[in-house]
Amino acid sequence: MDARLTADFWVKAYLMRLQLAGIPAFVTARGDASAGAVLVKQAPLDGTACAYQRSFNLMSGQRAWVVLAQGPEPEVDAAIARQRQFDPDLWVIEVEDRMGRHLLEQEGLAE
């Protein structure tokens, strides 16, 4: 049996890790507390952004963060809005860091 963290718990833990690293982040859309998916938007505050979503590789059985949209921030915001229309239980976390950090590659967040 593969136990999964609730979305609410994961979001709180992620925000705490970002805070400890001195990276500002905000919940811009709250999804379902137990089973909502999470999108992470990284904005380096230069007019661009990148949105990441969690994907599941059926061949390897691994989870990974993949790019949903990247480019001018209004275009990334539009892609996120389309995802929210499709999935109202979706969480959206906005990370604002000029160096482009989001920590999604770190242990415990990457998988």
Image: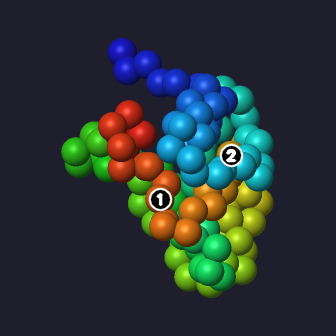
- Tell me the number on the disc at residue 88: none
For image coordinates 73% across by 47% down, the residue present is 27
Q: Let me know if residue 14 appears in the view.
A: no
Question: Up-down: is 71 above or below 102?
Answer: below
Q: Crowding near pointer 1: few (<14 within 10 Å), some, many (20+)? A: some
**Placement of 54 over or under 96, stated as above or below:** above
Image position, residue 80 (x, y; %): 68, 65
- Is residue 102 something that shows in the picture? yes
Q: Which residue is mark 1?
A: 101
Above or below, 100 against 20 in this view is below
Q: Secondary structure at mark 2?
A: strand
As drawn, the residue found furthest toward the top would be 1
Query: SS for tag 1?
Result: loop
Q: Residue at x 59, y 34 (%)?
A: 16
Tell me the kind of residue under disc 2. Trp
Q: Tell me residue 61's x, y (percent).
A: 28, 40
Between residues 67 and 87, which one lies in front from this camera angle? 67
Give the x, y percent position of residue 75. 67, 81
Q: Where is residue 87 shown, x and y percent of the image?
A: 70, 51
Label 1 or label 2, whichever lies nearer to me, is 1
- Quarter-wise, where is residue 31 in the image? top right
Q: Amino acid at mark 1?
A: Arg
Specify few, some or many for label 2: CA neighbours under 10 Å numbering under 14, 14-19, or 20 or more.
many
Residue nearer the viewer, 12 or 98 = 98
Q: Is residue 48 left or right of residue 66?
A: right
Location of mark 2 (residue)? 91
